[in-house]
Amino acid sequence: MKKSLVMITIMFVFTLSVVGCATKGDLAKVQSDEMMTRSKADQAAQDAQAAKTAADAATLKAEAAANRAEDAVKKAEERERIAEEKARSAEEAAQLANQKAQKADDVFQRSMKK
Amino acid sequence: MRLEKGDTLPDVARHFSLGINAVSAANPGVDIWVPEAGERIMLPLSFILPDAPREGIVINLAAMRLFQFKRNADALAVLTYPIGIGTEERPSPTGRMYVERKATRPTWHVPASIAKDHQEKGDPLPAAVLPGPDNPLGEYALYLSKPTYLIHGTNKPASIGLRATNGCIRLYPEDVERFYENTPVKTSVHIVNQPYLIGQRHEIVYMEVHAVPENLNTVEFDKAYRKLRNIEKETGRTLDWSKVKKVLADARGIPVPVFEIRKGSAEKIEAVEVQHPIELKGKPEIPELKADDWSVLVADVPDEIDAVRLAAIINHQGPQIPARVVAKGAGYRVIAGPYHAAGEARDAIKRLRIDLGIEGTLMKPVKEVVTRKEVSRK
């Protein structure tokens, strides 16, 4: 029993001494890791910021493109409307010309009777 | 043929002995009075003979064409002329008759119905119109056995190819002269109205249609349909009925191939390009208008085409009223003349009003206006 107690005590002391030594050695490493982590975090934050900026720029670009597209569509619609109007006017003018020609010919045909 | 500047379809029609109906039906969409220079038109110079005995004179009212058959020994010759026919109200008769008598420089005894029409228009006619430019019978007349109907010339050549008579048959002045000489009294006259004609040449079946689908003549169409069905039976082959339907729908008055009795026959058909003649025979001449002539201001027109059309219509009156277009400011002026006396110009004003509903204005000779101004200054 006494022998066992002595063994446990020795192991405990040995463990403590070993633990004590590890805490000391790792401190620098922890500090280094911490620095690295911080640096990584900073980098990540910077990357995130850059990504956000890029995303914002892309959004702006997309919005501008969408605006331009909308503008282009509107202008195309307007041009189509004008073209349709012109075609309608031309058709009306042609119809009117045909009506005038037909009317003139009707008068001519009547004048050909005895 | 390619049109030239200043051509009108009635002038082209007359030159080629065609009616205006035939030329305008063959060329839908072409302006009759102001066609575009360089425009290509089709001259319908092939005809399908009507389904009638090939003797004497056969007239197809639907095609507005007269056929004269002449037998020389064993050969049968056919002469053909375009005609003007009766209006819908006063149509030309159909049936068999013959030439009862003939006359050169005929006097026109005005029928009561026409006298009444003219009276109502404010243009009373004498009981008889003597030979001359105002006589609508022209220089030659053939009186038919059916009372009051004649085949005659005209003082309105532009009416050939129109439904404009009171039932008589009109020919161009140059045609009626030849026709008169070639037609003895007692010649048989067979008048038919066949808008759907089926003919055959060089193993090709042609169809010629003169009535738009809206005016379908079912009796006549059934006859043509039976002929086509018979061709199918005889050959044991089926017609392309879609072609037949298209010919019916277009109604262009020209023979169109619808069936090859022997396959490949239609490949031989070729249209012939006709050169524009140096001058169109019968085209109205427009004499120069001088400062000392009387004239008539017909209208001030803003659009050039309308002005040209109006002048052309006036030029094609019978007798002719010479008219030209003159640029005036931003618009155009149509002026009729020349006239050597005020009375002649006033007669033209009256004709413009009665025949065309146009109120013309008398224009004095420039010299007279100048002289009067000088007199007033003195």
Image (cartoon, coloured by chain):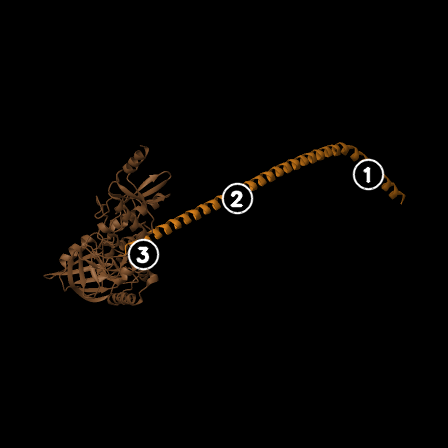
Chain colours: A orange, B brown
Crowding near pointer 1: few (<14 within 10 Å), some, many (20+)? Answer: few
Residue B86 visible at all: no
Distance in Å between CA atoms under marks 2 and 1: 81 Å
Q: Which mark is residue B98?
A: none
Can the viewer see residue B353 in this picture?
Answer: yes
**Residue B295's spot in the image, x, y percent?**
28, 43
The quadrant where residue B218 appears = bottom left
Q: Secondary structure at mark 2?
A: helix
- Of residues A17 and B134, the one nearer the viewer is B134
Q: Earlier in the sequence, mark 2 or mark 1?
A: 1
Residue B291 versus residue B358 in the image, above or below = above
- Callout 3: helix, strand or loop? helix
In x, y percent, where is residue A58?
A: 59, 39
The number of discs equals 3
Closer to us: B77 or A97: A97
Q: Position of residue B87 (x, y in %)?
A: 29, 60
The image quadrant of residue A53 is top right
Which residue is at the front of the view, A88 or B179? B179
**What residue is pinned by disc 2?**
A74
Instruction: Look at the numbered disc 1 and give the secondary structure of its residue.
Output: helix
Q: Can you identify the residue that label 3 sits on? A: B121
Q: Position of residue A63 (x, y in %)?
A: 59, 41
Task: Identify the amino acid type marked 3.
Answer: Lys
Which chain does tag 2 point to?
A: A
The residues bearing labels 1 and 3 have C-alpha atoms spaced at a distance of 140 Å
What residue is shown with label 1? A15
Q: Is residue A76 left or right of residue B173?
A: right
Q: CA distance from mark 3 to mark 2?
A: 60 Å
